[in-house]
């Protein structure tokens, strides 16, 4: 998070070269800080779980509320419990696609006047000191801004095959199940105010938009070392390509004419991760699975395009939009780890044929069981994400351009350019909390070997403090209700899943909201994240599996 500088007050006018020089100096910390914050917001997306992914990946797992660690009876075991791959019968191809509808809104606290040098604002929005209804917006409250981004897809394509009766392998491509692309208003940074006129987006200093993709090519194997014990592991090589957009403050206030439009192109070509698991078939009815996922920290390079003075008019007393570019900025971001424990009980169907047995247990519950129920407890080590570090190259610099008023009658206006060094080390606190997830779900086989229905509930504890909440992603407390079904026709399974997640509303007061300074140049008492954050999720999933 970034500390913003003290509001200089309504009487301050950015109409002199000296004033702009102070603004240019301030932009070094503010721009780089907010650039880093935007990167941090979306770098979290590749995380395997932990408040950043909803429960859960995979169609059948989604319908069971993510209670799938001990069940893991199809190729999705590669993600949840690689040890269970040892019980794959023959070979199978699995294709799942989740689609998340993320309905979220932020109502920022306060009015435009609270954080703006109104008499010095010479932007395309007019003069902020004019009254509402007369072309100004000084006393208007901030409008509510909602996510307008498209649904976020979360695909998975996996091939798994049995090599020997005790050993199986799997390979596939997985993607995180997250909100997907985000659009907090228009990419222009302009929203409709309470009276319908164009206004600067009150969330522009956080995240405005994100696009791109993250994939995890994954390989894994499971082996039965004892009749009742399986062990397994999977290796992931993550790749991310993300385009992010935010704005930065180039002065001690939120005066639009000195804003900087920050576009970030991020590529992370290799983020290794390892999943290890142990699976015990305690009895023919009882399964216990334990899995741990470790991920290396992200060390990425980012190209940053910064258009300073983007809302300026180019007239006397205003800024001229000036393009800046940082290439190959270094980004380091710690990644969460995850531990999961699943306990499952399955009621066997009397006299049912068994396709394959291991210590008297079956791995085709649709054929061999009447019903099952599972409890998963998932602990997300999100507290590893304490801070993001970003360093531009040593030659990085920021340039601003300002049209100063005439120094004397008859003298033409002077265009002034200011350049400041921007090669500073940054450490941006994020302060996430560890999260505890509880998932309970099960299947009921309505027609043996033909139709199964499933349901479940999920719970995740709060993973963010009110002081650092923002709109990039809100790992707040969530409760989910889930349902799904599978229809089998010979060797082909078709599955559907649905979940609705109720997310706790967060209200961050101006006293609670806190931004930590990077380069303290004043009293950081102006905050940008005070307000009300609401969200809910609707997730649908379709999956197909072919066994041969």
Image (tube, rainbow, N blue to C red):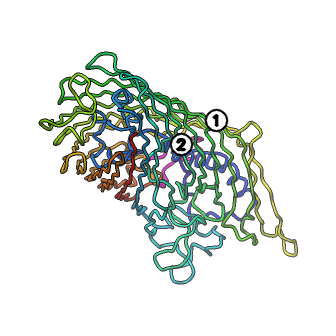
Residue 517 belongs to magenta span: yes
Q: Residue at the spot x=45%, y=52% of the render? A: 470
Query: What percent of the width, then of the height, locates residue 275?
Result: 43, 28
Q: Residue at the spot x=31%, y=55% of the render? A: 498
Q: Residue furthest left?
A: 350
On the picture, is 517 further left or further right than 500? Answer: right
* Highlighted range, magenta: 514-528
Q: Residue at the spot x=34%, y=20% of the render? A: 224
**Count of marks overlaid on the render:** 2
Q: Nearer the viewer, residue 138 or 427?
A: 427
On the picture, is 22 further left or further right than 231? Answer: right
Query: What percent of the width, then of the height, locates residue 445?
Result: 19, 47
On the picture, is 158 further left or further right than 59? Answer: right
The residue that disc 1 covers is 425
The residue that disc 2 covers is 215
Closer to viewer: mark 1 or mark 2: 2
* Numbered label attached to residue 231: none
Give the Cα separation between the discs numbered 1 and 2.
29 Å
Mark 1 falls on what kind of element?
loop
Q: Nearer the viewer, residue 132 or 165?
A: 165
Q: Quadrant of the C terminus?
A: top left
Q: Nearer the viewer, residue 336 or 384?
A: 336
Q: Is residue 109 visible?
A: no
Q: Main secondary structure of the magenta part?
A: loop
Q: Nearer the viewer, residue 435 or 353?
A: 353
User: What crowding class fits label 2: few (fewer than 14 Cα within 10 Å), some (14-19), or many (20 or more)?
Assistant: some
């Amino acid at each position: 998070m970034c500390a913003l500088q003290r509001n200089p007050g309504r009487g301050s006018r950015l109409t002199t070269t000296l004033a702009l020089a102070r603004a240019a100096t301030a932009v070094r910390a503010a721009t780089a800080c907010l650039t880093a914050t935007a990167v941090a917001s979306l770098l979290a997306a590749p995380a395997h779980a932990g408040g950043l992914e909803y429960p859960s990946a995979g169609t059948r797992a989604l319908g069971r509320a993510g209670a799938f660690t001990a069940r893991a009876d199809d190729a999705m075991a590669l993600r949840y419990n690689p040890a269970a791959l040892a019980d794959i019968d023959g070979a199978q191809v699995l294709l799942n696609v989740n689609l998340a509808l993320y309905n979220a809104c932020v109502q920022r606290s306060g009015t435009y006047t609270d954080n703006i040098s109104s008499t010095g604002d010479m932007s395309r929005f007019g003069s902020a000191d004019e009254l509402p209804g007369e072309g100004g917006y000084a006393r208007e409250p901030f409008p509510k801004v909602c996510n307008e981004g498209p649904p976020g897809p979360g695909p998975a394509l996996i091939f798994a095959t049995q090599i020997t009766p005790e050993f199986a392998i799997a390979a596939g491509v997985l993607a995180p199940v997250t909100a997907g692309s985000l659009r907090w208003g228009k990419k222009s940074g302009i929203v409709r105010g309470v009276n319908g006129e164009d206004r600067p987006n009150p969330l522009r200093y956080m995240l405005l938009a994100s696009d791109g993709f993250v994939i995890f090519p994954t390989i894994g194997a499971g082996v039965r070392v004892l009749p009742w014990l399986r062990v397994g592991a999977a290796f992931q090589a993550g790749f991310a390509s993300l385009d992010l957009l935010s704005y930065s403050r180039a002065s001690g206030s939120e005066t639009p004419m000195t804003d900087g439009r920050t576009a970030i192109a991020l590529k992370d070509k290799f983020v290794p991760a390892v999943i290890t698991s142990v699976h015990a078939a305690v009895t023919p009815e009882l399964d216990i699975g334990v899995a741990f996922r470790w991920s290396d920290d992200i060390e990425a390079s980012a190209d940053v395009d910064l258009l300073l003075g983007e809302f300026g008019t180019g007239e006397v007393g205003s800024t001229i939009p000036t393009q800046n570019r940082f290439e190959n900025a270094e980004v380091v971001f710690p990644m969460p780890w995850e531990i999961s424990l699943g306990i499952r009980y399955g009621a066997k169907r009397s006299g049912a044929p068994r396709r394959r047995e291991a210590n008297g247990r079956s791995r085709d519950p649709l054929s061999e069981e009447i019903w099952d129920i599972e409890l998963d407890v998932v602990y997300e080590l999100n507290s590893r994400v304490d801070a993001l570090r970003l360093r531009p190259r040593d030659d990085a610099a920021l340039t601003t351009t300002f049209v100063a008023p005439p120094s004397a009658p008859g003298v033409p206006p002077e265009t002034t350019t200011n350049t400041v060094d921007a090669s500073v080390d940054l450490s941006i606190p994020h302060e996430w909390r560890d999260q505890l997830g509880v998932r309970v779900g099960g299947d009921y086989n309505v027609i043996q070997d033909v139709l199964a229905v499933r349901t479940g509930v999920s719970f995740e504890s709060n993973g963010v403090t009110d002081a650092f909440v923002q709109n990039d992603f809100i790992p707040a407390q969530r409760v989910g209700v889930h349902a799904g079904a599978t229809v089998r026709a010979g060797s082909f399974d078709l599955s559907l899943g649905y979940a609705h997640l109720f997310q706790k509303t967060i209200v961050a007061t101006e006293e609670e909201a806190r931004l930590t300074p990077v380069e303290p140049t004043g009293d950081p008492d102006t905050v940008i994240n005070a307000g009300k954050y609401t969200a809910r999720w609707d997730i649908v999933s379709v999956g197909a599996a072919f066994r041969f």
